[in-house]
Amino acid sequence: MKYLALLSTLLPLLAAAAPVANDATDASTLVRRDADTTTVHLDQCSGSPQHYASGMLYGVTGKGGPMQAYLKFAGINYLSSGGAQTATSGWGASVKAYKARFATVVQDANRIHGLGGVQIIKTSDLWGADGTQPGDFPYPGDNGDWTSYDKFIQQLISDIKANGLARDYITQIELWNEPDLGYFWNRSVDQYTQMYLRGTRALRAAFGQGSGAFMPLVGPSTSTRPDPSNDWFKNFLSTLQNNKDAQPDVWNWHMEEGNTNDPVYATSVLKEWLPQYGLTGGIGFQNNEFGTREQQRPGYAAWHAARYEKVQFHALRGNWASGSALRDNLADLLFKDSNGKYHTTGEYQTYKTYAGLTGSPCTTDAGNSVDSYATAGSGTASALVGNSGFTGTANVVFSSISNLGNAAYVKATIKRIPYNNGGEVTMNVQVSTKKIKVVNNQVTVPVNQDNADDAYLVTITPA
Ligand SMILES: *[C@@H]1O[C@H](CO)[C@@H](O)[C@H](O)[C@H]1NC(C)=O
């Protein structure tokens, strides 16, 4: 209720405020605004949208929490889960506890496979190492005994097969979540390495490439990014140098550190490292958790989308909920009121807008903080504009306009995707429509950003 009340008072205010801000002409109140630029190259648009940043860590329960339509319109295409924080523990506690967690994975996989998406099975959550386990919880290979772990992996293999999850490429298996953190791996690196090699080899023997049920193995899923200071990661690469058969199929790390969590930088580091260790990079990269809670707002979400479209690999939004809320609300893209009814946030609208952009993705250039994801087709082009902490004028440049047809002018429409302080947002807000003259085969659409939290959608058509 609180959110609904807030929205009804806010929306008219926001709508009324926009033209005032745009028309400020009193010289005494004019302050020099910061400016930043993102450029859309309309001569470099090809292929079809992949929506690389539309994955999600947990966020659903069973069939109706929340309904499949919410996932569909938000374009959710990857889901990662293993029953973490459900009432039961996992294999480390009992086979029964593991079975209960596995049943949640089957539910989740059916939901995402039903949308044509990919399920990532979080093996460590099935083991019970989800960060809530007690201090004396057993780990694979304790006291040099691998019997239990080997049984666990064989049970997992047979359960995957028995439940119809052994599906070529669209089910993936993560060996262990954030093994560089004591919350998830409270044993030596050496014991981790032995577990990793054992598990990888057993799973690969069951679901190898070309088997008809290739289930890409995802790792090492560190909490930290590839960076020259990351000794854990470099040690992992050294281990694989002598165990090349155990390279991950999908190289994964998380982007939830105290910085912008820019995949472009971390990707360049890993790409430089791999050949130095004689490693190949498998079938690609993944960030199956990205974004701090602070970064979960439209402006940052659109920026992360633009960044993942640049590196072109799949990424999943982090999930900062806990307990039963972990498996609900699409990782906080939605929230529930006291009657249990779901409401959409501004970030949900950002995902929906991103998913709804048809046409071919175009190359875009980032500014210092502003970046965009853009598509073009059928005489129109759109840019979803985000930032990593920018207030001021974001100039959205569309170059090579002739690719949309010969036009002396374009009609440019700006819509705002409000953060609204995390409250309900049901639609994008119209900001302005104006005619802009094409000069040197390009147009610049200035977007006045009063805050960094909102995202913008800029659409142009020849006029
Ligand atoms: C790690 O294990 C020690 C005992 O071996 C235990 O006291 C401690 O609580 C554990 N830490 C975590 C984060 O589980």
Image (tube, helix red, strand yellow):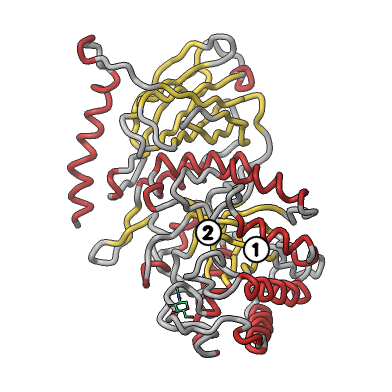
Going 75% across and 72% down the picture, which residue do you hit?
204
| Image location (x, y in percent) of residue 10 | 21, 40
| Image location (x, y in percent) of residue 418 | 33, 40
Residue 266 is left or right of residue 278, and the answer is left
Crowding at label 2, few (<14), some or many (≥20) Cα neighbours within 10 Å?
some
State whether residue 369 appears in this view: yes
Say which label, 2 or 1, has the lower sequence index.
1
Q: Quadrant of the N terminus?
A: bottom left
Per the image, label 2 sits on a secondary structure element best described as loop
Q: Is residue 112 positioned above or below 374 on the image?
A: below
**Along the viewing direction, whichever of 244 and 235 lies nearer the viewer:** 235
| Image location (x, y in percent) of residue 436 | 45, 14
Residue 384 is left or right of residue 233, and the answer is left
Q: Quadrant of residue 330?
A: bottom left
Going 71% across and 44% down the picture, which residue do you hit?
272
How far is disc 2 from disc 1 in space, using C-alphas?
Answer: 14 Å
Q: Which mark is residue 223?
A: 2
Per the image, label 1 sits on a secondary structure element best described as strand
Q: Quadrant of residue 241?
A: bottom right
Residue 59 is left or right of residue 9, and the answer is right
Q: Are marks 2 and 1 in contact (CB under 8 Å)?
A: no
- Residue at numbered disc 1: 218
Going 46% across and 33% down the picture, which residue do you hit?
385
| Image location (x, y in percent) of residue 230 | 59, 53
**Along the viewing direction, whichever of 217 and 412 lies nearer the viewer:** 217
Q: Amino acid at mark 1?
A: Val
Q: Amino acid at mark 2?
A: Ser
Mark 2 or 1: in front is 2
